[in-house]
Amino acid sequence: MVLAMAAFSLEDMFIKAAANFVPVGEILILFGIGGTLAFTLLTLGRNQAIFHPKILSLPILIRVGCEITGRLFFTLAITFTPLSSASAILQATPLVVVMGAAVFLGERVGWRRWSAILIGFIGVMIIIRPGLESFEPASLLAVIGMLGFAGRDLATRAASPVLSNFQLGIYGFFILIPTGLFMLLFNIGPDNGGITANEFVWPDITSGMQILGATVFGVLAYYALTVAMRTGEVSVVTPFRYTRLVFALILGVLVFAEQPDVMTLLGSSIIVISGIYTLVRSRRNRVKAGDIALKTP
């Protein structure tokens, strides 16, 4: 999960940089094509089927819808708002995942972790600052993207085990191609450098390398995240997603000269502390459950 978060942060950095010269919809198309080809080759290398009947199962269909929502809105968020603040809002994903695991997957979550989830959401509200003059409506894009990614992670957990991580990667990246086309057709995204959101341009060497970098790190991140979500207990694995905030803050400051304000740092700290507490409680519960199992004749 930590590896996935580091790679996702680098992916976001390259996408945000490329969006200064290439429409966001076009970036998603090229990004989707590159990721689809990479996971197709990996799937064929293991003699696995590209198309499997289980891709029409309910968890996969839900996963596709959540993937579109998460990718579309978070990509817009990192182009309209600072990388550090968008990534900070994204840190609420583990809280939503733990909550969803309790509601939909039957995992036990006690009142202490429910309290931590609530406190974490307060941290999100501090970052967004609704009702204040510093409120940025574009920050809601990151909130919607966060909800989409949380749904994707839960659907990944519920996906049929007959589908390999490489096959899930194919479907996850392929859906970005029509999503990008949709953005181009309906002029969705920012207008940068005189280039409109619905204009298809040929990337120069710099933007081409940035999109390639986003694809490489995106494939690595996607695979690592899928493995983490399918092999670890959701309530234990997901708190490690908070490491993405550290990577994003560093990249935001060093690459984009961002200066997160006190409210953003305060809200981020509250979210991270809530996640760490959730992790500690999860481990304690696992230890207790193991001791009870050993003592039971």
Image: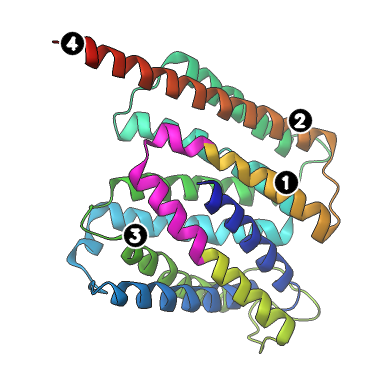
Query: What's the mark number on residue 85?
Result: 1
Q: Which residue reaches farthest bottom?
A: 202
Q: How is the image coloured?
A: rainbow
Whichever of labels 4 and 1 marks the residue nearer the N terminus, that label is 1
> What residue is shown with label 3?
165
Marks 2 and 4, how far apart at CA: 45 Å
Count every numbered label the image shows and give the total.
Answer: 4
Q: Is residue 259 left or right of residue 54?
A: right
- The quarter of the picture where residue 78 lies is bottom right
Marks 2 and 1, how far apart at CA: 11 Å
Q: Is residue 78 left or right of residue 217?
A: right
Residue 228 vertical placement versus 266 (above, below): below
Badge 4 amino acid: Thr
> What residue is shown with label 4?
296
Whichever of labels 2 and 1 marks the residue nearer the N terminus, that label is 1
Picture residue at 48% right of the left edge, 38% below the top: 238
Taking depth in this image into account, of 84 and 3 the one nearest to the observer is: 3
Are discs 2 and 1 less than 8 Å apart at CB?
no
Taking depth in this image into account, of 187 and 202 the one nearest to the observer is: 202
Are discs 4 and 3 less than 8 Å apart at CB?
no
Residue 90 vertical placement versus 36 (above, below): above
Where are the magenta residues, as a range? 219-239
Query: What's the mark number on residue 48?
Result: none
> What residue is shown with label 2?
266
Tell me where residue 56 appears, x and y as whole percent. 23, 62
Whichever of labels 3 and 2 marks the residue nearer the N terminus, that label is 3
